[in-house]
Structures are given as structure tokens and as C-alpha cells.
């Protein structure tokens, strides 16, 4: 139901995002999904990667400020209106969405979301039998062989 | 332990008698041997005979930093060069350097006062002392060094810089005492983890920090980070170097070795003497100095004095810990601001590291303040909103503490330059615009 997401603090400097990416590349860590939230002075890079423990260790060694957070991950139907349908359930329960991003992995459509109430969100997911995604579902190798 | 009980616990009548006798001798000597003082006293209409006791000190002229520069290099020396055994000098970043000279007696007195300071903190012959103050023209390294040898410490004269080596020797040699600037002590503490050390590798018990103004909160922070008892050693090269005053285990102000350095507090603007308990500029007269004796030297450090007996048994006059100088005071939109006030607020909030840099600028004839402060990893969240509310929280705390609006920018760790000597905390761009 939850997977681990890396959050990296990034000052707005030219080439800084690429500094992080090259550390990950050098250590053969695959990026499954990535998004950057930005303000005028800094941003937060959020990424789902193939090996969160190793990514944390190598980024810290390179003096990046990084943490790992648990984040909700759901599978959506690949059909119009499926994301709206899911989000409606949260709105009806008065849960606020802090941020959301979506991506495809193989044949799956995946929704990542952070709400202001994790426990209540999990109750909703269970009650409505929403399909959740685990880290196992996102293993790169298996995906490669399917291609 | 009290190194010199006779002096450090002397009653006030005997102390004043000793000071009076020394002052009379000093004034006679500088009037006869230093042209600068001879002229200045004549101009004020003061003769050595007018000085009969320590109370008469207020009749004497003040000495300022500019007087040392104007008499560069040796014109204020009161002893011939063949009696001078050591010369120290300031870095001269703001102009010509200032030079000070020591006779053999001066070096012995310096050794004695530093030994008293170190004994106040509980340091003794069993200690291994890592001296990470700079050695050389700066008085910090050599000044503490001689005193540490006098109390019998095993001294590691590593000098400043080279953080990795500092930590390696601290661990390998089992240093029990660290002597350096408080900002460097903080830097070393923060560098432990990344260099592969933890506090368990260290045997440090005591820190003797000084040479720059620092707050009580910073002292507590250093105690927490290192698991030590942290002390403040005060001094300045013009008067002697480190060892003019030090706090004891009660941390209730710094005991001044007033048999050698007579303190006064004066009003920053009028230069009138202020009574005990009132804050003003700290002024010292070097009662025993031979190389470069100074009358009423204005340190520009802000402090107060108290003469109450300390719980440790010493009767020496105590000065409040220095957290600011009248000349590093910034005037922002007419409001007086000391960098130490910022440090105090940050450490009290405890939401960020204590590494910060304050940028002062002028936009459309209005002074602006921007504070860059390093984010603490435990406070990193995955939403911008929470980081912004952290910045707002710091801005709000600063605004209520100093009455000025400050823009707070969070920056990555280790991006604010670390000093290995005296910390630079302010960049004032108004002067260059």
C-alpha cells in the first residue's frame, strides 16, 4: 500500500539536479519515477528508485540532504475518469491531497499520492478495495524481460 | 582547583591596595618611557603625582585601537628591544596590523594567568590538551600553550585547520581537552560523522573556547554536541592574549585577573565610567605589563561587571560573557542589531543548524536583511509547504526578538563557509554599493 520515496533538498543552482542524477547513475540505481516541486529558492526532488537504501547511502556520502518517506501507491485502471474516481473517495472523506503524480510502468498505470491523513487514507483504500502497488511490483528486471 | 589562592581569593581592601601600588608605578613608568602617553597626559593636564590610588584611574587618558596603528610597529613599547623576547601582531584586515611586545616577565605573567584560567575549568596534569588555535603571530595558540604546559598538561600543538587530522589525532591520542574558537569547535563536531567518527571514539571532557563573541546558547549547544563542559576564555592581544578572564565551573561570568588587568565599564558614547551591573564598553589597564603597557584600553567589547563572591570561592571581579562588540553592531533601519542575537534565536528554536550568514543590503534606500541558514536533515520533509512554514516560523521568531523583518532562506548543509579561526557571520553589502 505504501512504497518508499526519496526526498532530496535542492537549492536552485544550475546543474544541481544533474549532480544528483549522476550520483544515482554512477551507482547503477534506476529511477522509476521522478518529480520536482519548486519554489523560488529551492526545490524538493521526489523519486522512486530501484534501491532506496543504497540511494540514501550514496547521496548522503556526497553531502546531499536526503530522506526517505513512505508514500501511498495505487494502481489505476487505464481508462478515462479512473483517477478522478479515486480522488473523489478522498474528497468525500474530507482528506486533503498534498501532492500527487502518476506514471506508467509496463502495462500498469500508477498513482502516487500524499494526503494530510495517512491512517484515514489507508482505511479508505481498504474499504473500497483499491488496488495497491508494492515495491515488488516495480522491479526493473522483470519489466525488462516483459518488453 | 584554585591555582593562586592568595590572589584569586584576596579580600577587596588588599586587592585595591595592590592595584593602587601597581597603577602608581605604571603611570610613572609610561610617562617617562612612552612619548605617546607623556604627550597625551600633558595635553590633559595630568601628572603622575595626580595618581595616588586606583580610584584616580578615571583621570587617565583612554587608549584606542587606532593609537596602536598610529604607533606601528614599536612606538608604544615601554621596554628597549633587547628586553623584548616576543612579538605578536594582529592580522591587520582593517588596515595596518597592530603589534604587541612581551618581556620575559610579561611571558611569565601570561603563563600564570592562563594557568589560573585552565585550573578554573578543572584542567590539570592528567589532561591531554589539543590546541587548535592558530600558532604564529596570533596570540591564541602560543598563549594557551605556555599556560597548559605550566599546569602540566600533555600539549598537542596542532594549530588550526585540517579538520580530518584534528579528528584523527583527537581519537588516536585521546585528547581530553580541546582549545579553539567556538565556531571551529562546532565545525569539528559537525564533521565527526562524515569523517567516520562518533563521540564514543573521543575522550574529550572539557572545551576551552574563545577569541570571538559567542552566546550562552552556543556554549550549551557545544556541551551537548561534544558531551563536555565548555568554558569561555577571554582575552585580546592588546592586553595580553587569551587568559585575561575565564569562567569557572559555575559559569556565572568570567573571573578577571584584576591584579594584572584592571577593568572598567564606560558608556559607549560619552565614555563616562558606569557602575557595576550596567552594560557598556569594557576597558582594561595593564597593571603589570612591561613590553607594551596600556592605560584604559577600550576593547569595544560590551559587558557588565560584578564584584559578588562566586560560589567557587574566588573574589576576583567577574565580567558578563561577551556576546557583542560596540563596533560589530549593525544599525538596520535605525535598529541596533548584534549578530549574536540571531544566533540566540536560532539555537533557541532548535529547528536548524547554528551555521548562518546574514546579508545586509540596501534596496531603494531601505536596509534589507537576508538570513541564510542550513537546513537540518531531520527537518527535511517531502513538501515545499512545510519547508516554507519552517522558514516563516524562523522569520517570525527573529521578528519578535529583534524587531526587524528578515527574509529567511534555507540552504543545503555545508554550503555556508566554515571558519577555522574567527567566524564571519555578516556580509554588509551596503558599504560596497
Image (spheres, coloured by chain):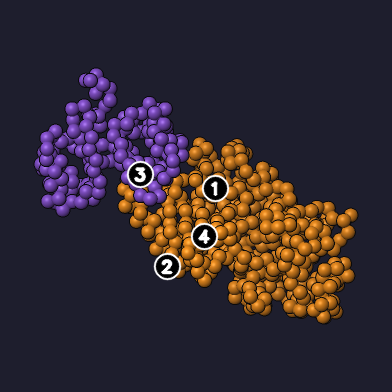
Chain colours: A purple, B orange
Q: Residues under labels 2 and 3: Cα distance?
A: 29 Å
Q: Is residue B83 left or right of residue B123?
A: right
Residue drawn 69% across and 49% down?
B141
* Residue name at image x 73 percent, y 61 percent: B238
Disc 1: host chain: B
Label 3 marks which chain's residue? A
Rendering coords of residue B194 (x, y %): 49, 39
Q: Residue B360 shows which numbered tag?
A: 4
Q: Are labels 4 and 3 assigned to the same chain?
A: no
Q: Place residue B396 in its image quadrant.
A: bottom left
Chain bearing mark 4: B
Rate crowding at label 4 as few (under 14), some (14 to 19) or many (20 or more) other CA atoms within 10 Å.
Answer: many
Q: Secondary structure at mark 1?
A: loop
Residue B178 point in image, percent of width and height: 61, 48
Badge 1 is on which residue?
B417
Q: Residues within 10 Å of mark 2 (few under 14, many from 20)?
A: few
The answer for how far apart the CA atoms under marks 2 and 1 are is 28 Å
Residue at horizontal 52%, vertical 37%? B195
- Residue behind mark 3: A44
* Alpha carbon separation for disc pair 4 and 2: 19 Å
Disc nearest the viewer among 4 and 2 = 4
Query: Label 2, on which residue?
Result: B400
Cβ–Cβ under 8 Å for marks 1 and 4: no
Using the image as rendered, state which of residue A22 and residue B381 is in the foreground.
Answer: A22
Amino acid at each position: 500500500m505504501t512504497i518508499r520515496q526519496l526526498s532530496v533538498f535542492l537549492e536552485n543552482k544550475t546543474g544541481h539536479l544533474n549532480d544528483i542524477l549522476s550520483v544515482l547513475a554512477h551507482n547503477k540505481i534506476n529511477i522509476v519515477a521522478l518529480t520536482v516541486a519548486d519554489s523560488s529558492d529551492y526545490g524538493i526532488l521526489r523519486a522512486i528508485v530501484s534501491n532506496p537504501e543504497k540511494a540514501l547511502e550514496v547521496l548522503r556520502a556526497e553531502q546531499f540532504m536526503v530522506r526517505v518517506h513512505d508514500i501511498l501507491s495505487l494502481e489505476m485502471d487505464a481508462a478515462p475518469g479512473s483517477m478522478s474516481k479515486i480522488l473523489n473517495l478522498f474528497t468525500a472523506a474530507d482528506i486533503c491531497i498534498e501532492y500527487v503524480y502518476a506514471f506508467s510502468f509496463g502495462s500498469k498505470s500508477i498513482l502516487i499520492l500524499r494526503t494530510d491523513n495517512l491512517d484515514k487514507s489507508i482505511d479508505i483504500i481498504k474499504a473500497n478495495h483499491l488496488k495497491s502497488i508494492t515495491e515488488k511490483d516495480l522491479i526493473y528486471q522483470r519489466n525488462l524481460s516483459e518488453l | 582547583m584554585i591555582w593562586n589562592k592568595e590572589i584569586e581569593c584576596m579580600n577587596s581592601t588588599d586587592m585595591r591596595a595592590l592595584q593602587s601600588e601597581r597603577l602608581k608605578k605604571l603611570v610613572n613608568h609610561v610617562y617617562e618611557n612612552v612619548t605617546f602617553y607623556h604627550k597625551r597626559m600633558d595635553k590633559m593636564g595630568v601628572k603622575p603625582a595626580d595618581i595616588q590610588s586606583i580610584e584616580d584611574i578615571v583621570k587617565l587618558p583612554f587608549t584606542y585601537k587606532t593609537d596602536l596603528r598610529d604607533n606601528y610597529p614599536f612606538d608604544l613599547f615601554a621596554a628597549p628591544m633587547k628586553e623584548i623576547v616576543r612579538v605578536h601582531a594582529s592580522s591587520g584586515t582593517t588596515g595596518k596590523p597592530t603589534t604587541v611586545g612581551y618581556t620575559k616577565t610579561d611571558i611569565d605573567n601570561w603563563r600564570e594567568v592562563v594557568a589560573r584560567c585552565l585550573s578554573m575549568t578543572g584542567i590539570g596534569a592528567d589532561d591531554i590538551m589539543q590546541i587548535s588555535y592558530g600558532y604564529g603571530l596570533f596570540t591564541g595558540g602560543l598563549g594557551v600553550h605556555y599556560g597548559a604546559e605550566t599546569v602540566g598538561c600533555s600539549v598537542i600543538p596542532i594549530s588550526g585547520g585540517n579538520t580530518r587530522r584534528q579528528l584523527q589525532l583527537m581519537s588516536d591520542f585521546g585528547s581530553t581537552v580541546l582549545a579553539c574558537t567556538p565556531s571551529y569547535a562546532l565545525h569539528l563536531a559537525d564533521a565527526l560523522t562524515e569523517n567516520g567518527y562518533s563521540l564514543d571514539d573521543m575522550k574529550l571532557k572539557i572545551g576551552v573556547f574563545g577569541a570571538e563573541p559567542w552566546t550562552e546558547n552556543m556554549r550549551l549547544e557545544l556541551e551537548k554536541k561534544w558531551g563536555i563542559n565548555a568554558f569561555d576564555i577571554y582575552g585580546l592581544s592588546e592586553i595580553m592574549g587569551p587568559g585575561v578572564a575565564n569562567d569557572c565551573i559555575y559559569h556565572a561570568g568570567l573571573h578577571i585577573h584584576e591584579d594584572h588587568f584592571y577593568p572598567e565599564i564606560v558608556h559607549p558614547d560619552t565614555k563616562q565610567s558606569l557602575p557595576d551591573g550596567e552594560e557598556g564598553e569594557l576597558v582594561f589597564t595593564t597593571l603589570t605589563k612591561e613590553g607594551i603597557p596600556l592605560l584604559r584600553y577600550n576593547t569595544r567589547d560590551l559587558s557588565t561587571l560584578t564584584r559578588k563572591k562566586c560560589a567557587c570561592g574566588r573574589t576576583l571581579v567577574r565580567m558578563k560573557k561577551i556576546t557583542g562588540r560596540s563596533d560589530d553592531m549593525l544599525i538596520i533601519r535605525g535598529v541596533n542589531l548584534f549578530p549574536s542575537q540571531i544566533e540566540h534565536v536560532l539555537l533557541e528554536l532548535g529547528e536548524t543548524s547554528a551555521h548562518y550568514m546574514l546579508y545586509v543590503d540596501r534596496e531603494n534606500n531601505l536596509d534589507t536583511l537576508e538570513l541564510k541558514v542550513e537546513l537540518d536533515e531531520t527537518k527535511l520533509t517531502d513538501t515545499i509547504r512545510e519547508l516554507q512554514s519552517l522558514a516563516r516560523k524562523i522569520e517570525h521568531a527573529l521578528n519578535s526578538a529583534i524587531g526587524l523583518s528578515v527574509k529567511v532562506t534555507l540552504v543545503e548543509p555545508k554550503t555556508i563557509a566554515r571558519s577555522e579561526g574567527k567566524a564571519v557571520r555578516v556580509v554588509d553589502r551596503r558599504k560596497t554599493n
